[in-house]
Image (tube, rainbow, N blue to C red):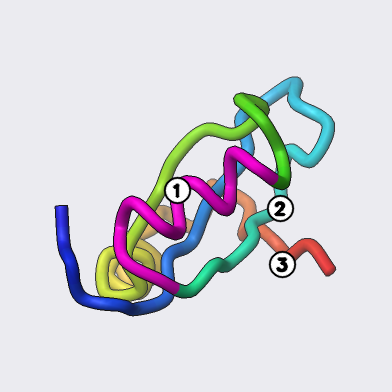
Amino acid sequence: MSETKQWYIFTFGVGQQHAGHYVKFYGTYAEARQQMFDAYGREWAMQYSEEEWNDWLQRKPAWIPAERELK
């Protein structure tokens, strides 16, 4: 877990209210995670650093639909 402040991207799981979307929070790993819990409780799936997220977008198979940012 990184103590460096950066953007973290959180996705939602299939069948959850915001499935197909993602949100971003800035802070350390733990701070961003707490912000996500404060905003959405346990109704989310994965946490990615911005670097991990960008890597995933480069490798993501074409048949997997792209998530949209939740505004």
Q: Nearer the viewer, mark 2 or mark 1?
A: 1
Q: Amino acid at mark 2?
A: His
Q: Mark on residue 21?
A: 2
- Real-space Cα distance between discs 2 and 1? 17 Å
Q: Amino acid at mark 1?
A: Arg
| Neighbourhood count class around disc 2 (C-alpha, 10 Å): few under 14, some 14–19, many 20 upward | some
Is 14 within the magenta?
A: no
Dot 1 lies on which element? helix
Q: In the image, which residues are magenta?
A: 27-38
Is 30 within the magenta?
A: yes
| Neighbourhood count class around disc 3 (C-alpha, 10 Å): few under 14, some 14–19, many 20 upward | few
> What residue is shown at x 84% (from left), y 69% (from top)?
71
| Neighbourhood count class around disc 1 (C-alpha, 10 Å): few under 14, some 14–19, many 20 upward | some
Dot 3 lies on which element? strand
* Viewer-side residue, 31 vs 69: 31
Q: Which residue is mark 3?
A: 69
Q: Mark on residue 19?
A: none
Q: Which residue is mark 1?
A: 33
* Viewer-side residue, 33 vs 14: 33
Q: Position of residue 16 (x, y in %)?
A: 75, 26
